[in-house]
Amino acid sequence: MLQKKNPYPIHAQAQALKALGDSYLTKHEFKPGDLVQLKAGLNILKEPAYGEVAFVLEVQSGRRNSDTNSGGNHEYEPTEIRIGIISGMSEQFEGYWVDANRFEPYKN
């Protein structure tokens, strides 16, 4: 069986994984009206992109993605905050439910 070669030394990979995991597990208390941004290394979304700001519209503790059509690993991911963004594709205000653990308060 052919094994996929990892381009990163195992020690560097372990350090990166630990840092990203710790960042993901760091919780922030958000409320409607807060400005937020993605945490470094934790983007799985098309929008917002890194460095873009989002506006918290709604918070529902314990909410999970119930879209059975999303497939993959994100089908039951936590989606506790609803954010509003100005979509780069349509230049319109759009709202999305997202995993709060992937966001942090906006730092200007």
Image (cartoon, rainbow, N blue to C red):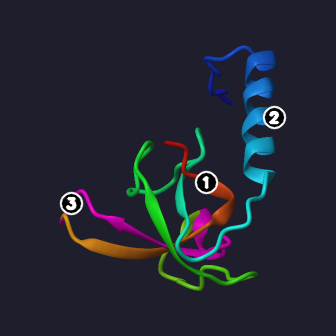
- Give the mark nearest the N terminus, 1 or 2: 2
Who's the residue at 59% across and 85% down the image? 66
| Secondary structure under the numbered disc 1 in the rendered image | strand
Dot 3, how many residues are within 10 Å of its Cα: few (below 14), some (14-19), or many (20+)? few
Q: State how far apart marks 1 and 3 are (Cα).
A: 24 Å
Q: State how far apart marks 2 and 3 are (Cα).
A: 34 Å
Who's the residue at 68% across and 72% down the image? 78
Q: Position of residue 105 (x, y in %)?
A: 61, 54
Q: Which residue is mark 3?
A: 89
Q: Position of residue 37 (x, y in %)?
A: 52, 52
Q: Which residue is mark 2?
A: 18
Above-or-below relation of 54 to 64: above
98 on left or right of 63: left
Q: Which residues are magenta?
A: 73-90
Is the residue under label 3 in contact with that under label 2 (CB below 8 Å)?
no
- Give the mark nearest the N terminus, 1 or 3: 3
**Disc 1 or disc 2, which is closer to the eye?**
1
26 on left or right of 53: right
Q: Position of residue 85 (x, y in %)?
A: 37, 65
Q: Which residue is mark 1?
A: 105
- Considering the image in quadrants, where does the N terminus appear? top right
Dot 1, how many residues are within 10 Å of its Cα: few (below 14), some (14-19), or many (20+)? some
Q: Is residue 66 magenta?
A: no
Nearest the viewer among 67 and 78 is 78
Q: Residue reaching furthest top?
A: 9
Who's the residue at 75% across and 18% down the image? 12
Q: Position of residue 70 (x, y in %)?
A: 49, 74
Above-or-below relation of 50 to 67: above
Residue type at the position of mark 3: Met
43 on left or right of 18: left
Residue type at the position of mark 1: Pro
